[in-house]
Image (tube, helix red, strand yellow):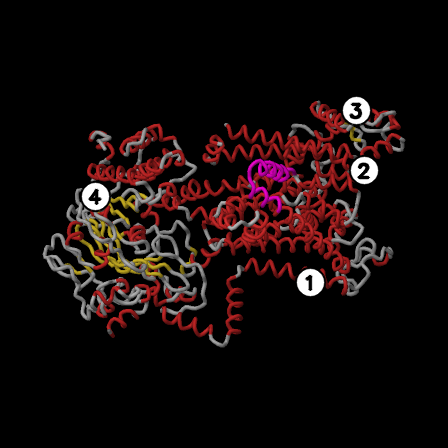
Amino acid sequence: MSAQLTTGMGSDQSNSINNTAANALKIEAPTGRKSVIKRLISAYRNTPRKFKVGLLIIVFFVLLSVIGPFVRPYNPNSNLTNPNIVNNSPSFSHWLGTDYQGNDVLSEVLVGTGPTLLLGLITGLISTTVAIVIGVLAGYYGGIFDHILSLFTNVFLMIPALPLLIVLEAFLQNNGTYTMALVLSVLGWPWGAKVIRAQTMSLRNQDFVAAAKETGESNFRIMAIEITPRMISLIASGFIYAVLYGITASVGLMFLGFDTTAITLGGMLFNAQNQVAIQSGYIWWYMPPALIVAVFGMGLVLLNYGLDEIGNPRLRDANRYGKLGRKNMRPSDPTPVLALLSNQGEKGFLSKLTSNGFSRRSLETSPKSEG
Amino acid sequence: MGKLFTSNKNANLLLDISGSETYDTEAPVLSIENFSIAYRSIQGDVKATDRVTIDLKRSEVLGLAGESGSGKSTLAYGACRLLRSPAIITDGKVTYRGRRAPREGIEITALAAKQLRQLRWREIAIVFQSAMNALNPVITVGDQLDDAIRAHLPMTTTARNERSEMLLDLVGIPRQRIKSYPHELSGGMRQRVMIAMALAADPEIVIMDEPTTALDVVVQREILTQIIEIKQQLNFAVIFITHDLSLLLELSDRIAIMYGGKLLEVASSKDLQYQTAHPYTEGLLSSFPSLRGPKKTLAGIPGSPPDLRNLPPGCPFFQRCRHAASACRSVSMNLQNISRDFAEPHLSACPFHPGPGADKRWKAPDLVDDAVHLDQPMHASADGETLKKGLML
Amino acid sequence: MKYILQRLGFYIVAAFIAITINFFLPHMMPGNPIEAELVKLSQGGSNVSPKTVCAVAQQTDTYSPHCGLHKVSILSQYWHYLINLVHGNLGYSFSQNETVAHVIASTLPWTLCLVGISTIIAFLVGTLIGIVSAWRRGGSIDGSLPFLSFFQGMPYFILGIFLLYFLTVQWNTGLPDYGGVAAGIQIGWTWAFISSALFHSILPAITLVLANMSGWAVGMRNVMITTVSEEYVLAAQAKGLSNWRVVMTYGARNAIIPNVAGFANAISLAVSGVLIMEIVFSYPGVGNMMYTAVTQDDYFLLTGLFLCISLAVLVANFIADGVYALLDPRIRKRAANS
């Protein structure tokens, strides 16, 4: 195509070069603060909505898990079975009701969210680190070293993680939260390693690596300083998926009854399942932990979709440019003809375009020049 | 290159035309009138082509030349309405008058999607710039040829197969290659497949979008020779898009020069080369060496193409023109015939052309002395600053 | 063909690694739990006779002084284990009082049918949604994709709990929420069995399809958006082909290839999720049996089930690789060149 589409989204819509230049000068003048705020606002506007919603969900639950233990109304682990308050539905004194031991569900949730999220965080950190080390080494050195590492990566990618985790956990016999994080990390790295390896291989052949080698930088320095930082968005996305995997797998293992000594969301679900809470209709008991896991997971997935869109603007730009008035254009639609659109009763079409942020003036053809 | 086919075989590729005795043999096969296309964007709309008017005569080769970003591809694809959103046709119309069209012609800019599908490839086919990208990598060459035939011609499977094979014969590719995937062919072969595919439904017009740019010189030459041969036998009209003006001078009957979305000069190849009427054409002509002509310094054109989003009024080439003067900022960009021959007009957008037989000097009012002007840095002239300085001297 | 052979080689290596892990895992654990368990069982106190326990101990070379067995070097144990495996001998399940092979034969088909059918449905539906939402950017289907991520982010069993609550407790749809087949129906190729089994698999299958679908849909959409702007799609439009043909033969046909390549990761994730989900629905598959094995410390059963499910996933991936090679002619050539 002969004309290039600029994908950047300046809020500035001035029509001539002179004006733009003048504005740029004005902004850089004394009021430097305003420009920071303005930049923040425009950065906020440019962030995909999925990213924002995902981040909001995550921040909310992280705050909940941090504040939770301090504001819990009851001791969630009293273990004093009081027959009067067992399996009570929500009431004024117990907002989310009580479980089969008479523990306050709200308190359990407030206390139990923290360890669950922490487990995901630790798993994410460890397995992402392993993924970076293995992926970068394999991708950078190549050869037989790469063959062996990627063979292992591919095999571990295929062996279903959960049954192996069950086997491992069964043999380890409830050794506590941190052992579980370690066990989860053992199986959490292959996906990230595979992606990072592929990216490293393409970066390795680029000029900046050759230049660094020429200046005598060590291989370790090239990998750590030159290559790894360039994959930051890939690593971030891998980290998010690793955290999601950590939470999902740990909640699943706890649901099976592993490591349920501390109060966790998975442990609550384990108890609920054991006490046939679903069939008994104790919705207040199992729904809160299930919802927290589900919504937090959704937050992570949305965050990752948002990252995808930031990394690949094409995924969302069509939403902005693909509209004609209110109509979504499909790739199969012939190039629209302005005259036809106005004829077909699309009245006020131009003003619709303007409301989409397109300038009306420029849509009209330039004035016929004087004879 | 020898003849790869007998004229007998070739006649089979021409399809029988029925009920089209009424068409006007003199009228242009494609008329583009006052045609404007804009790409919408939040930072302002890009006027990729601006009020372009040009005719394509029956079975002629029309060259469309210009730098990248000049709007030449946009014009051709836009005329088939192949450009996707955010492109929009803001003005003008395109009329097709082929053998199969009614006498008054078909207005492409008024067609609905379904009618357009019938018109595409059957009447106007395209040879894309990079055959590697334009061929579907996971489908065999034969299936892709067959696709094009089946969409337009009511034929049996065997007839379609035979036609596919004949098309491969025509471009000199062995028949057994019909089962090959694009990645199994060489670059030159892929481009030949692309040409064969363009001829699948016996179109009236073939748009060739830099068909040889991605190839090495020898293959390029072979394919061009082939295109000319086939064209002479099948008698279609060609719009040949390229930035390589030297190529066009050999190949085309007429040449149109585009710049900044506007037509600057339209003339027969000979006139364009020897009676150059626009300074931009002059610049293009002096930016490549001539094989046979006398030695000369390659001047080229300093600076870079203008920003189509903020095009000032007047001549778009103004900022880079050696002969520019203040009058150029208010010049009308309407094409004027500078030749006395009305049958074969020589159109130019520059009113300050030297005229036939003149000493190749453009005489714009307020013309600044060449020597002074050439010393100025060309890229700094975004707002005419250079010009003002020149005038003060 | 060469490509398929290369992949076959890889899967043989992968299977060997899985088998080896399966053997060494219990032996590397502190205090070898299998030995400890066998000692406990052979001292009586279970419904299995000490004689059977000792026979198993002998067969598996497990160190068990109580049965008069001595320590054997780990390599010869490993060799013995491999020989046993070739004969289909995976040990004895003390909790089920049957050979492990027999237990697997009665549980694995349930899981494989459930996962297989729902994964294929999820893949087809998700891919279709992806195609439509990429072609109709900004349309209602495209707009609802982010909401599908709700199903994607949670473990399958939690989605199972939600569905169980809404479809059986809240709105009583009459869908069975327990087991794989109605009580009293004999397993066999009878209409009564098949219909009942299908009816019972509806809830677990919906869970799986919902959870899996959005991942495929988003993946397909993102690749498809890139593919649609490829020049060969534009060329197909210039050729005047019907929209259906442009979308399917030129767009989706190319966009689906990376998705099929991502099948390996997806299928192992799906299997992992299903195992826990089976417990929610008391589905008589591998997951439930594994749960039983864990709660009853039945290590032979546990490792045997793990091995079988891993091998099944490897086979599924091998099939996916074959499909991949069918879809992408370039892969075939690349393999032939290397």
Q: Which residue is mark 3?
A: C59
Which residue is depicted at the point 44% across and 46% down? C227
The answer to whether residue A142 is magenta is yes
* Secondary-structure class at tag 3: helix
Tell me where the magenta segment starts and ends, as one range.
A133-159
- Dot 1, crowdedness within 10 Å: few (<14), some or many (≥20)? few
In this rendering, would B66 be left or right of A279?
A: left
Between the C-alphas of marks 2 and 4, the distance is 85 Å
Labelled pair 2, 3 in contact (Cβ < 8 Å): no
Mostly what secondary structure, the magenta segment?
helix
- Is the residue marked by circle 2 packed among few (<14), some (14-19), or many (20+) residues within 10 Å? few
Q: Amino acid at mark 1?
A: Leu
Q: Nearer the viewer, mark 4 or mark 3?
A: 3
Label 1: which residue? A63
Inter-mark Cα distance, 1 to 4: 74 Å
Say whether mark 2 and mark 1 are on the same chain: no
Q: Kindly indicate the quadrant of the structure image that contains residue A115.
A: bottom right
Choose mark 1 or mark 2, whichever is in front.
1
Task: Kindly identify which numbered label has been placed on residue C296.
Answer: 2
| Residue B99 disc label | 4
Q: Residue at x 34, y 62 (%)?
A: B307
Identify the amino acid type marked 2: Gln
